[in-house]
Amino acid sequence: MVYFIAFFSLFLIVIFLISRKKSRKTIPQTSDFINNSNEYLLRKAFELQVSRNFDDAINILDNLIEERGFVTKETLDLRALVCDQLGFFLDSIDDYSESLKIDNSDANNFFMRGVAKFKIGDYSGSKIDLEKAVSIMPKMEIYNQQLNLVQAIDNPEMEEFAKEKASREGLLKRRIKTAKSLKTHTVNNSLFESGIQSDLILLKKLVKDDPNNLDLKKMLKEAEQRFKDEN
């Protein structure tokens, strides 16, 4: 079996540019500040995954996806990878499937889903995904190697045996998603606080530059309430 460890590229951090001229000042929307916090938490989840702190990484990802509704290709891909690393292959397959609904041209996601299916004995499903990955990136050696492996053992009897073995070994288990506020998790709540604090710092600066702007004052009040609710 070929084992594949996927590494993600660095995530882009949202940068807010503040104009000094009030006449040209662009007023950020409340959603801008929420997204800024989400991106911060996603980056932290990635760092935790790289350091192999899978439990804390998946807690953050569950919060982002299940509670905050931050469902993006990046969050789904990362949670799928962490689920695979924790041995929750069915959950990993589900997240890769959702991600492929967003972008069905990602060869690596077809490959990773195919590998997860292979681990639970779904050789026929694995073969389909790996063939798709190879069709998108035919020169990727690791894709071809895994496909050749599956093709060599792809027959009904072998697949049935592999599925029974996966079931006996508990590889078909599903996990309970932790869709709760981060402050109830074991993960350090300062991760979330830092994201909200960055919003507050920017909003306070904007209000200071434009003290008569009622919209900015309203957004600042909302951000302060969010910070209070999470602490």
Image (spheres, grey):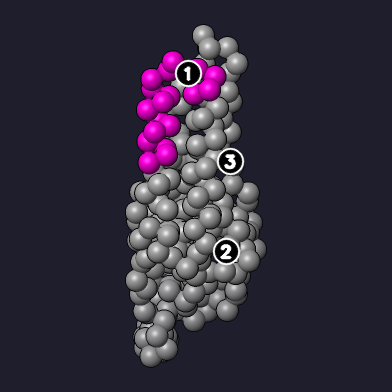
Q: Residue at x 62, y 63 (%)?
A: 50
Q: Quick one: quadrant of the N terminus?
A: bottom right
Amino acid, disc 1: Pro
Residue, x 41% and y 81% (percent of image)?
171
Which one is in front, 157 or 95? 95
Q: Amino acid at mark 2?
A: Gln
Of badges 3 and 1, the one in the foreground is 1
Majority secondary structure of magenta residues: helix
Dot 2, crowdedness within 10 Å: few (<14), some or many (≥20)?
Answer: many
Residue 94 is situated, as x and y percent measured from the top left of the image, at 37, 63
Disc 3 element: loop
Q: Is residue 195 magenta?
A: no
Residue named by callout 3: 13
| 67 w.r.t. 89: above or below | above
Q: Secondary structure at mark 2?
A: helix
Say the numbered circle drawn on residue 211.
1
Give, as a single range, the part of the protein colored magenta: 207-225
Nearer to me, 111 or 83: 83
Q: Using the rendered image of the protein, determine whether residue 43 is visible from the camera's viewpoint.
A: yes
The residue that mark 2 highlights is: 49
Which circle's residue, 3 or 1, is located before the other in the chain?
3
Judge whether residue 217 is colored magenta: yes
Residue situated in front as seen by the camera: 113 or 126: 113
**Local crowd at mark 3 within 10 Å, few (<14), some, or many (≥20)?**
few
The picture quadrant where one finds residue 8 is bottom right
